[in-house]
Amino acid sequence: MIKGLIAPILTPFNNDLTLNQNLYNEFAKNLLENGCSGLAPFGTTGEALSVGNQERMIALEGLIESGVDPNVLIPGTGLCNLPDTILLSQHAMKLGCHGVMTLPPFYIKDMDDQGLFEHFEKLIEGINHPKLKIYLYHIPQVSGVGLSIDLVSKLKTAYPDIITGIKDSSGVWENTEALLNINNLIVYPGAELPVIEAIKLGAPGCISATANINSQDIGEVIKLCHSGNWNEAEKLHVKVKKVRLLFQDYAPIPAQKAILAMQTNNDLWNNLRPPLQSISSEKANALASTLTKDFEFSI
């Protein structure tokens, strides 16, 4: 189990929109040195569905070759089809990654729990790795396909050593709370907003997009919780929540990349693969101004 803050790391692209491996490696190490306990490459925030299978595998190999410990990595591998999901998952496990994070098969309408159970059953059989750890990814407002509490519980019962945990990005506290009641299931809220209440119920931390730009403060909130300093955690959490909500007023991925470009003086961070588009310079400057004036960011 990775205890603390996990960043769904942003993916940097060159001007020709190829993946910039050196910048990726550098940023990963920076996050791990500044509040993050783990990384989740190629999640929603990492523009995963705009990155090809071969690109993902090469980038993951590059991270590890650069010195990133594979045991802090939970790469996203979930796609609509089993063969590609198996391929990416096998590759990650062979590299020694802590586990993989898998969406349910998306796009297909009206899937029932039995069909989804059989999908994960075939996925586990196909990966066929003795140390396999699967973290489910529940983000129905984006994927169009949810993972019910009953389904998650059934999967955990059937594969107790493999179905390790879940990232709950539903934004519905009652759902997160119900997941936390499933015996021995590791639950990461998909944002820092409910992280204190989640830790009180047994969560090890959270997996949050804004870890890419606010890792130190979010990580500190989690550390304070685990050390029992609840009052200090609550005080810092007020600031952390405001930063999160500020970014939710913008297109989150372009906004975070714009701030990183300013902070690092590296315009490559503004590059996104279509259909995503950069935010305007006016919006970027307004966001930067608020972050520096109200939240003491260095930009």
Image (cartoon, rainbow, N blue to C red):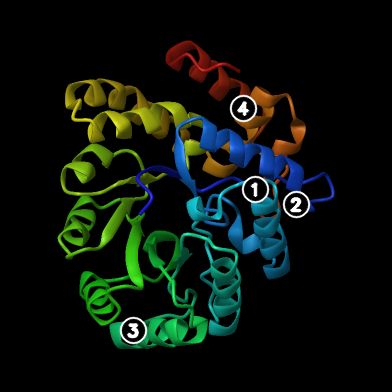
Q: CA distance from mark 3 to mark 2?
A: 34 Å
Label 1 or label 4, whichever comes before in sequence order: 1
Residue that mark 2 sits on: 19
Label 4 or label 2, whichever comes before in sequence order: 2
Which kind of residue does numbered mark 1 sit on? Thr
Q: Say left or right for 187 vs 284.
A: left
Q: Nearer the viewer, residue 172 or 154?
A: 154
Label 2 or label 1, whichever comes before in sequence order: 1
Residue that mark 3 sits on: 117
Q: Nearer the viewer, residue 275 or 293?
A: 293
Q: Quadrant of the N terminus?
A: bottom left
Q: Quadrant of the C terminus?
A: top right
Q: Residue at x 22, y 73 (%)?
A: 153
Q: Are marks 3 and 4 in contact (CB under 8 Å)?
A: no
Compared with 44, 195 (above or below) is above
Callout in the foreground (1, 4): 1
Which kind of residue does numbered mark 4 sit on? Ala
